[in-house]
Structures are given as structure tokens and as C-alpha cells.
């Protein structure tokens, strides 16, 4: 049983190491930069860089910045905000269904913000040209709006004449969720052919925060040629960039629960660039294939723009209905995608059936134990037999303490006689590693679990237990030791479970293993409370199952 105990803690330790240290042990591999092929005309991509003028000297609040410009407002059930008429810039967007904190009067989550604010975050779309004499609409262009309110039922049409025979029309639509459609039209009455390149960009300021999650990718993200590309902010220094060429896909910025992205054309190659454009300023942009607009004809280009929450089921619908390649990968499912995503759907189903995510997690733990019941049964039966013959093992260890080879031979003979497989306890423990890590990912990435309450004091299952020792005792307890009631309950169940197992023969190992429940209680004490609740119930079910088998085998 000594080997089984090593396997137990090795499995749990490995789970925690994977979770806590994955980013450090396995640093993000930077994507291979695809060099774009040379074209007959050099694309003017430098014009996409953020201009220094956008770094406002005076920082305004969002409301002040919005009031300073003419606006087109938009609203549906999911979002509220506005588009700046000058430059047709998407720079104000609030998420109606999500609040910043648990407070009743908490403001809604603000995703997009004007350039003059503390944390600018906005998107623009337009045209580029190799002919510098062609006047094109830009960030300071004052468009003429046909109407001032955008809704799912009413698109908005913008117009601008460049005075050179080119009329630019932009039609903006919004669905019932987070997807905008930007259709760009050019009417060429100049008397000569012109070639234009459609582009789009998303620009934001990102400041490092202590609350950033280490297990969820936050930075630039996209799917290019069916391959997920993730670039951390720290990987881009001033002036550095990552470039890709892709037929279809999407690219933008990813936060823990929200993201923005432009959707690339599936039928032609686009050139995508991730770059750092200034102090804490980052940009994702693309340039599409050239559009030849002959004299007295019309040229068009259409781009979709997503800005909203990472609602997994909605992203799956967009993937299918709009034919967006792997749009669901905006959610960081991690290494165990094949488990993480099904786990989410099971939890979501149980939640909709029960009505409370905490109870859904507990039921999920019970279902997992039921699935693993046959394997766990064999494991616990072997462990119980090991405990039953432990006195004989101790006698052998004492008898052959100076002859390790003979000791191993005699122990194997004893195992065969008692029909014990000492390795049988490892399989369910190994199975628990991906299950533990996958559930941890689900609880960290799923917006459906954000701010989801349980019973009592648990108001957010994605956050640590708030009823900590310092709260209960009003003592100044150091942060690492300041854990909640549920972690303590988890540690207690680990202690009880350990007592059901045979003690290691080695006294030093026995003392070390005795401390393990206490160590893991504090290690996991600052994890999502939903995970700790799951682990506690799983331990309780294991204890019940093991006690029944021990009674069956005849072990006290």
C-alpha cells in the first residue's frame, strides 16, 4: 500500500503542478511567422499603425468622451453603446447581461471605450490604396448618417463623398447578440479604374493587473488557416509584430470572459498582423485582397465584427450558422479540450435542470463517481486487502530488512496468495488528473459560472470561498493561510480518507503523508470554490464507497 499512497499523492501533486505551474513549466510557444508572398503592389500596411495623436493628453471618462462627438446609438438584449460618426469608430459598448461586481448597483461590464479614456478599446474598418492621391475615409472622416439608431431591425447607413468622383457607403447591421456586420460600398464615378484594399483593426490599451488569471489566455488571439494562434501581450515589444496569412478564420483580443474579433473572408486570403503600437497599446489588424472598382461600377467588401461575452453555446452557433472556423476556440479550453468542452455542456444541462450551479457541480461529482464506480471498486478492494495483510508485510520487512531482493520476492508471493494487485489503486488516480484539471478549466473559463451563487455564503462559484479564517476570527491572518470553510472541509475529508488507507512502513514517509491533507487544504484554499466543493463531495463519496468495501473484506 506504500506504493499506492505514493501514487495517490503523486497524482494529486501532478494535478496541482499542471494547474499552477503550466505557464511557467511550459511557456507559450510563439507561433511561426508566415511571411506573406510578394505582390505586384506593395500593401500600405504602415498606415494601419495607431497614430500618436490618438494618445490623448487629457484622459476623459467614457461619458465625457462620448458627449464630445456625434454618435449613432445601438441596443439589443445583449449590448448597448454607440458608434462615433467621425471615423465610424466602434468605441463604446456595454454588456447588458453582465455586471462588474456582485454589488446590486454595480455598473455593467464595459468592453469598448473611446481613445481619450484611461483604457481605450475600439475597432475601425475602411479602405487602403497604393495611390496616395486618392482621398480615403479615415479616423477623422465625418460621415453623413441616414439615421442615428442601430438595432437588429434597423441597420444604419453612412455616406461620404471624397470630391474625386468616389462615393463611400457603409452599411452597419447588428444581430440579437454580439455580432456586427460592416458592408463597405464604393461607387466609382471618377472616370478611371481604382484598386482598393479593405482593412479592419482592433486597438486597445492593456495594463498589467494582479487579478489576471494565469491559466486562461489573455492577449491577442485568432484562428488562421484552421490553427489557433495565441500571442501574449508580453511577447510583443514596441514595434514588434507577428504576421500571418489566412483564408478564413478570425482574429482579435481575448480576456478571461470577453473578447473581440474581426471575421476573415473564407473565400480569399487576408494578411493579419498582431503588433504593439505604443506604450501599453496593442493592435490586431488585417488587409484583404484588392478590390478592382472599374469606372462607373460599384465595389464591395463585407466584414463581421464580434464584441461580447464568451458564451460557449452562442459561439458554437456562430461557428455553424456563419461558417466561422473554430470560433469556439476563443474560449481557452486548454489541453483537455475533449473533456473540458463536454464537461461544460454536462454542467450547463444539469444547471438548467436543477436551477443552481452549485448543486449542478455536486450532481456532476456524483455522476463521475458513478461512472468510475467499477474501477474504483477494484481499487478500494485491493487497498482494503492491502490494509488487511499489512501486519504480514511489516513482518516481512523486519525479517528481510537486510535483503531487499528477498523481501520483494516474498512480498510478491504474498500478493499472489492473497490475490492482491498493488498497482490497481493507481488507475482511478491517473484518471482523476485530467478530470480535475478539466473541471478546473471549466470553472475558470465558463462565463456561465461567473457570479453563479450556491447556498449560504457562496455567491460566486468561480471565486475562492469568502468566509475565511480572518473573516470568522477577525484576526490578521496572512493571505496564504487565510482560507475558507469549504477548503477546511475538503482537508478534513482528505484526512479521513487517508486514515482508511494503510500507513507507510517508513516513519518519515508516514509523517510526510500525514501532513498532505493540511498542505493541500491551503494550496487549494484559494482556488475557485466550485472546484473545492466538487473535490469535497468526491472525497465524501469515496469514503462511503471505501468503508462499504472494507466492511465487505473484513477490515476494521
Image: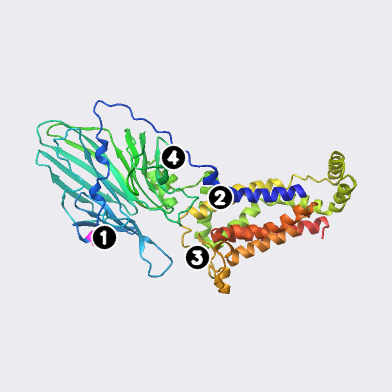
> For the residues marked 1 and 3, what is the alpha-carbon distance in whole angstroms?
35 Å
Q: Which residue is mark 2?
A: 19
First in sequence, mark 3 or 2: give its number: 2
Mark 3 surroundings: few (<14), some (14-19) or many (≥20) residues within 10 A: some
Mark 4 surroundings: few (<14), some (14-19) or many (≥20) residues within 10 A: some
The outermost residue toward the right is 399
> For the residues marked 3 and 4, what is the alpha-carbon distance in whole angstroms?
33 Å
Q: Which type of secondary structure does the marked residue at label 3 adopt?
A: loop
- Image quadrant occupied by the C terminus: bottom right
Q: Which type of secondary structure does the marked residue at label 2 adopt?
A: helix
> For the residues marked 3 and 2, what is the alpha-carbon distance in whole angstroms?
24 Å
Q: Are marks 3 and 2 in contact (CB under 8 Å)?
A: no
Q: Is residue 540 magenta?
A: no
> For the residues marked 4 and 2, what is the alpha-carbon distance in whole angstroms?
21 Å
Q: Nearer the viewer, mark 3 or mark 2?
A: 2
First in sequence, mark 4 or 2: give its number: 2
Q: Are marks 1 and 2 in contact (CB under 8 Å)?
A: no
Instruction: Say left or right for 406 vs 451.
Output: right
Q: Which residue is mark 3?
A: 453
Q: Which residue is mark 1?
A: 60
Q: Nearer the viewer, mark 1 or mark 2?
A: 1
First in sequence, mark 1 or 3: give its number: 1
> For the residues marked 1 and 2, what is the alpha-carbon distance in whole angstroms?
40 Å
Q: Nearer the viewer, mark 1 or mark 3?
A: 1
Mark 1 surroundings: few (<14), some (14-19) or many (≥20) residues within 10 A: some
First in sequence, mark 1 or 2: give its number: 2
Q: Position of residue 15 (x, y in %)?
A: 61, 49
The part of the chain drawn in magenta is: 61-66
Amino acid at each position: 500500500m506504500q506504493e499506492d499512497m505514493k501514487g495517490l499523492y503523486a497524482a494529486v501533486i501532478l494535478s496541482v503542478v499542471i494547474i499552477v505551474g503550466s505557464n511557467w513549466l511550459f511557456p507559450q510557444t510563439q507561433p511561426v511567422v508566415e511571411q506573406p508572398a510578394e505582390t505586384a503592389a506593395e500593401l500600405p500596411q504602415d498606415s494601419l499603425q495607431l497614430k500618436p495623436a490618438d494618445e490623448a493628453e487629457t484622459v476623459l471618462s467614457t461619458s465625457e468622451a462620448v458627449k464630445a462627438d456625434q454618435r449613432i446609438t445601438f441596443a439589443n438584449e445583449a449590448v448597448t453603446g454607440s458608434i462615433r460618426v467621425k471615423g465610424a469608430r466602434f468605441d463604446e459598448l456595454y454588456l447588458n447581461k453582465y455586471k462588474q461586481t456582485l454589488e446590486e448597483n454595480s455598473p455593467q461590464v464595459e468592453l469598448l471605450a473611446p481613445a481619450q479614456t484611461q483604457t481605450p478599446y475600439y475597432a475601425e474598418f475602411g479602405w487602403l490604396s497604393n495611390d496616395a492621391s486618392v482621398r480615403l475615409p479615415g479616423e477623422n472622416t465625418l460621415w453623413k448618417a441616414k439615421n442615428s439608431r442601430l438595432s437588429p431591425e434597423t441597420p444604419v447607413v453612412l455616406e461620404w463623398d471624397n470630391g474625386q468622383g468616389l462615393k463611400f457607403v457603409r452599411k452597419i447591421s447588428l444581430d440579437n447578440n454580439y455580432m456586427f456586420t460592416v458592408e463597405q460600398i464604393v461607387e466609382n464615378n471618377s472616370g478611371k479604374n481604382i484598386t482598393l484594399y479593405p482593412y479592419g483593426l482592433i486597438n486597445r490599451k492593456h495594463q498589467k493587473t494582479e487579478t489576471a488569471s494565469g491559466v486562461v489566455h489573455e492577449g491577442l488571439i485568432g484562428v488562421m488557416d484552421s490553427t489557433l494562434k495565441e500571442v501574449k501581450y508580453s511577447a510583443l515589444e514596441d514595434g514588434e509584430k507577428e504576421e500571418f496569412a489566412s483564408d478564413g478564420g478570425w482574429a482579435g483580443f481575448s480576456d478571461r470572459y470577453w473578447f473581440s474579433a474581426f471575421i476573415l473572408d473564407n473565400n480569399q486570403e487576408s494578411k493579419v498582423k498582431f503588433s504593439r503600437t505604443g506604450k501599453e497599446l496593442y493592435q490586431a489588424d488585417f488587409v484583404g485582397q484588392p478590390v478592382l472598382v472599374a469606372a462607373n461600377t460599384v465595389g464591395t467588401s463585407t466584414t463581421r465584427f464580434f464584441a461580447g461575452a464568451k458564451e460557449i453555446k452562442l459561439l458554437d452557433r456562430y461557428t455553424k450558422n456563419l461558417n466561422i472556423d473554430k470560433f469556439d476556440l476563443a474560449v481557452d479550453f486548454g489541453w483537455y479540450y475533449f473533456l473540458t468542452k463536454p464537461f461544460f455542456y454536462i454542467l450547463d444541462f444539469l444547471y438548467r435542470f436543477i436551477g443552481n450551479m452549485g448543486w449542478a457541480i455536486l450532481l456532476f461529482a456524483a455522476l463521475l463517481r458513478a461512472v468510475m464506480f467499477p474501477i474504483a471498486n477494484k481499487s478500494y478492494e485491493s487497498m482494503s486487502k492491502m490494509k488487511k495483510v499489512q501486519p504480514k508485510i511489516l513482518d516481512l520487512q523486519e525479517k528481510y530488512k537486510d535483503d531487499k531482493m528477498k523481501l520483494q520476492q516474498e512480498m510478491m508471493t504474498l500478493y499472489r496468495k492473497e490475490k492482491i494487485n498493488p498497482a490497481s489503486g493507481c488507475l482511478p488516480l491517473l484518471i482523476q488528473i485530467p478530470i480535475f484539471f478539466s473541471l478546473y478549466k471549466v470553472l475558470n473559463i465558463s462565463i456561465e459560472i461567473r457570479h453563479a451563487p450556491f447556498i449560504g455564503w457562496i455567491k460566486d462559484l468561480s471565486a475562492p470561498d469568502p468566509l475565511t479564517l480572518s473573516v470568522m476570527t477577525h484576526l490578521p491572518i496572512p493571505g496564504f493561510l487565510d482560507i475558507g470553510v469549504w477548503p477546511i472541509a475538503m482537508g478534513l475529508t482528505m484526512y479521513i480518507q487517508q486514515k482508511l488507507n494503510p500507513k507507510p512502513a517508513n516513519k518519515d514517509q508516514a509523517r510526510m503523508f500525514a501532513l498532505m491533507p493540511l498542505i493541500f487544504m491551503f494550496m487549494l484554499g484559494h482556488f475557485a470554490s466550485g472546484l473545492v466543493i466538487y473535490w469535497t463531495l468526491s472525497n465524501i463519496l469515496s469514503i462511503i464507497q471505501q468503508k462499504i468495501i472494507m466492511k465487505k473484506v473484513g477490515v476494521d
